[in-house]
Image: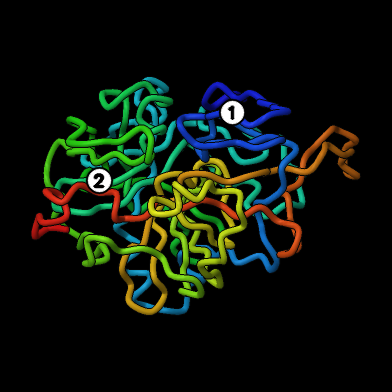
Amino acid sequence: MSKCSRQVIKFQTPILLSNLMVVAGVALMLCSAVMTTSVRGAIIGADNLREWHEEPDVATRNASRATAVLVQKSRGWLLPVSDRWKLSADVPDFEQADGVCRDERFTGQPAPGDCSGFLAGPDLLVTAHHCVGALGGCGNLQVVFDFFVASPGPATFDFHRDSVFQCATVVASDEGQDWAVLRLDREVRDRAPLRVVADPVARGLKGTPVSVWSHPRGLPLKIAGGAAVREPSGFIPPEWSQDYFEADLDVFGGSSGGPVVNSVTGEVEGILVTGFGEFEDPETDPVDGRECRRLRRMPYDEATMPWVARMRSIPVILRANPSF
């Protein structure tokens, strides 16, 4: 089942893709809209993807409630029922949406989302610029908090009305550096915004331990730690190094816009914007003989690291906002 317009993009020579350099292979912007089968990445080394309830640190669980999934309003997948919102029965699960093998992790979980974002002020949400255009613009974006698996066992998903918002306007954005700040239709009053690195020229330093909180493939929130800022591989052009850094994060389409958080300070170091690879080549499901796909898992020394837009890219006027 289609989510965004999904297509494989292959290149033999360097080109610009949404002002990001792609070299000799395949790249994707981490909205579900664009997928890749050649350049490798996705789960790097150990699989660090955790459900919300599996995260042992209470402070991390609480802070991660400031992460939201972006859902396209035009699909009608969120239905108002009294003072709550429920997922439509038409929402595909992970297996239906992406054709994954039945023994993969997270099969059976609903996948209504296309990108991620995080609360940075009472009514301000930060996400990736490419998410806004790819999903039909601000007016088509529903912003949903509390989309996570709260406890072991079968999960059901409905949302209090205070967890669902509409994008009202784009406050500021930069297509080249791939960030956008959205104003929501009202303030979010039941959770704290994330803290952003205070240094106006802040940058992820080599070795900084980081995690990413996002909705890969539009699934319920996953917290992926065990990563660090890495030595630039040379894949990012040197003139862009002040705007991006690399980290060995476990991410997939839909993770775009998710906060990359310093594991020591709890501050947001950057915005997840680009990754490479997602699925292995199709194989035959041993259960029913259908064609299916597996999440790509790569050894550290063979993986192309995801890119993170540094928070220094956010305008000074917004960084000076006490809400940030």
Vertical arrangement, residue 289 with respect to residue 297, above or below = above
Residue 319 seen from this side: yes
Give the quarter of the image for residue 202. bottom left
Give the quarter of the image for residue 120. bottom left
Residue 254's disc number: none
Find residue 282 and report its horizontal and vertical position in percent.
83, 36
Left or right, residue 183 beside residue 132: left
Amino acid found under the numbered disc labelled 1: Ile
Q: SS of the residue at dot 2?
A: strand
Sequence-wise, the earlier of marks 1 and 2 is: 1
Q: Nearer the viewer, residue 257 or 87?
A: 257
Residue at 50 percent across and 36 percent down: it is 20
Residue at 91 percent across and 44 percent down: it is 286
Residue at 32 percent across and 60 percent down: it is 65
Q: SS of the residue at dot 1?
A: strand
Point out the image quarter for the N terminus: top right
Find residue 32 and report its horizontal and vertical position in percent.
54, 34
Q: Nearer the viewer, residue 14 or 73?
A: 14
The CA span between labels 1 and 2 is 30 Å
Residue at label 2?
A: 125
Residue 156 seen from this side: no
Find residue 132 and report its horizontal and vertical position in percent.
35, 30
Residue at label 1?
A: 15
Q: Are marks 1 and 2 in contact (CB under 8 Å)?
A: no
Q: Nearer the viewer, residue 145 or 198?
A: 198
